[in-house]
Image: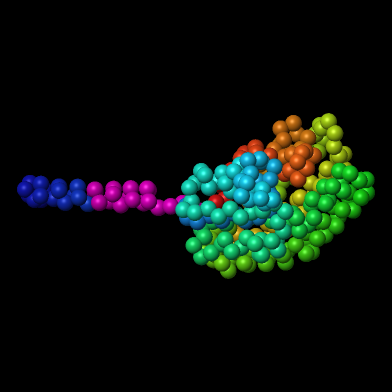
Amino acid sequence: MRPDSALRAVPALWSAVLAFLLAALGVLFVAPDAHAATGRYVALGDSYSSGLGAGNYDSSSGSCKRSTRSYPALWAAANAPSSFAFVACSGAKTGDVLANQINAVNASTELVSITIGGNDAGFAGIMTTCVLQSESSCLNAVAQARAFAENQLPALLDQVYAAIEARAPNAHVVVLGYSRLYKIGGGCWFGIGDTKRKALNGAADTLNTVMAKRAANAGFTFADIRPAFTGHEICSGSEWLHSTTWPIEESYHPNANGQRLGYLPVLSAAA
């Protein structure tokens, strides 16, 4: 190549290199993460989603007890979605989601989180039985709840998940589970014995297994929070859950640390 031809080629070469670098930088800085959800976020579910037990309740939420310290509110504050519909409600069952919450989900929804099923299985009543009544009464109540979770809850969850899918077919849906309540062998000033604790933890495991399977069948992400709560159960000495407390409705629910350090990181990893 003649020297003058080589010189004329230099600008063209640098232009090509610059165009390549700009394209590469565009990929690096513009392409979103596969699960990044900065659009419309809807939080459905029961008291574990509303944040009962974490305090700082929005007065406008009434008996639903939606807390600014709940994992949905914390996630929204950290990620600034384009909109945030927080409709989870303390005491909600699957039927309540379908009757009172599902309308918040629509075709523009990009992320849905939900924890539901515990109230259907009657866990509030089971806790009352296990705390106040005999060991045999507790074990019978737990056995009934596990049977319900295995035999009747799947169809109820399927209805909720199908409704979410129908209303927001392109949304990323994260189903969050429930923690085990007790540390076996842990020390408490008062409370129930290890036999009851093991039974209640086993019921939580059954509930999570059912939820995980139904979520997978629906094509949703199941986020297991039990590993995050390990070492922070009731009687662990570093509790992220309330034991029997006042107001009584907050008993056996995640406290502010349980929402912030337990649920929030799990949702963030799955969202």
How far across and how far down the image is residue 83, in percent? 49, 54
The answer to which quarter of the image holds residue 229 is: top right
How far across and how far down the image is residue 203, in percent? 79, 51
How far across and how far down the image is residue 21, in percent? 28, 48
**Magenta-tinted stretch:** 17-37
Q: Is residue 55 magenta?
A: no
Does 234 appear above or below 32?
above
The answer to which quarter of the image holds residue 211 is: bottom right
Q: Main secondary structure of the magenta part?
A: helix
- Tally of marks: 0
Q: Is residue 104 visible?
A: yes
Q: Is residue 217 visible?
A: no
Which sits in the foreground, 200 or 11? 200
Which sits in the foreground, 93 or 7? 93
User: In the displayed structure, does residue 15 sit left or right of residue 109?
Assistant: left
Question: What residue is at 25 percent from the left and 51 percent from the top?
Answer: 19
